[in-house]
Image: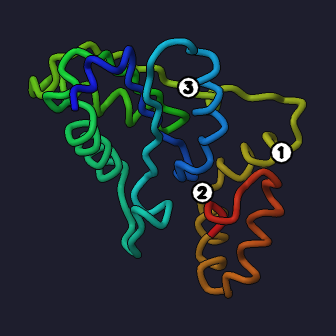
Amino acid sequence: RDLDQELDLDVVVFPGNPGSALFYIPYMRYLHEVLHPRRLRVRAVSNIGHSRDVYSAAHYTLEDQVCHKVEYLLKHCTGPQLKRTPLLVIGHSIGGHMAIEAVKRLRRKNQCTKPIKVLALMPYLQFDESSRKQRWIRTIAQAPRIPATFASILGTIPKSIAVPLIKAFDKHLDEESAQ
């Protein structure tokens, strides 16, 4: 079918960390509401290793994540059925870097000639001094051995204990992301 005739805009969301697309469902619904009555398709792409549909026990580098996003865009957003439909790639946090880099690579290799815009949402660049949680995170981030040690310890204890500990840190975290 010719999606070019059906769509005004194709939107793809690249998550930050944790990189589960499920976390972005409310945001994608919001985009549908805000951009109505435009005809659009909104999707999110989980980071490899961050959800069951793209999971493996391997560890992935940022470069691996960017390559995964380039492959996704090539496969799902640039085919002949979408030659002219403008593409908006939205990246949240580190997903913003992935979005910028993936689109840059597509353009550099002339693998996509349609209009593409990138929106990089980077709230991690902001720091709220009044937030106890952000002050704590900043302190921990300045000593990288602390989170590395914590992650190593979490990896050795049963999920039935680790998941509640992780969810206690962020009450909005869903079960899949905590795992």
Q: Which residue is mark 1?
A: 133
The answer to whether marks 2 and 1 mark residues whose Cβ atoms lie closer than 8 Å is no
Q: Tell me which amino acid carries mark 2.
A: Pro
Q: Which residue corresponds to the image point at 22% horizontal and 26% vertical from the top-left? A: 2
User: Which of the two discs, 3 and 1, sits closer to the camera?
Assistant: 3
The answer to whether marks 3 and 1 mark residues whose Cβ atoms lie closer than 8 Å is no
> Which residue is situated farthest in the front direction here?
1
Image check: 129 left or right of 139? Answer: right
- Nearer to the camera, 81 or 76: 81
Q: Position of residue 145 (x, y in %)?
A: 60, 63
Q: Which residue corresponds to the image point at 54% horizontal and 42% vertical from the top-left? A: 16
Q: Tell me which amino acid carries mark 3.
A: Leu
Q: Earlier in the sequence, mark 2 or mark 1?
A: 1
Q: Position of residue 140 (x, y in %)?
A: 71, 53
User: Which of the two discs, 3 and 2, sits closer to the camera?
Assistant: 3
Q: Secondary structure at mark 1?
A: helix
Quarter of the picture containing the N terminus is top left
Q: Which residue corresponds to the image point at 59% horizontal and 76% vertical from the top-left? A: 152
Q: Tell me which amino acid carries mark 1.
A: Lys
Q: Is residue 153 above or below residue 65?
A: below
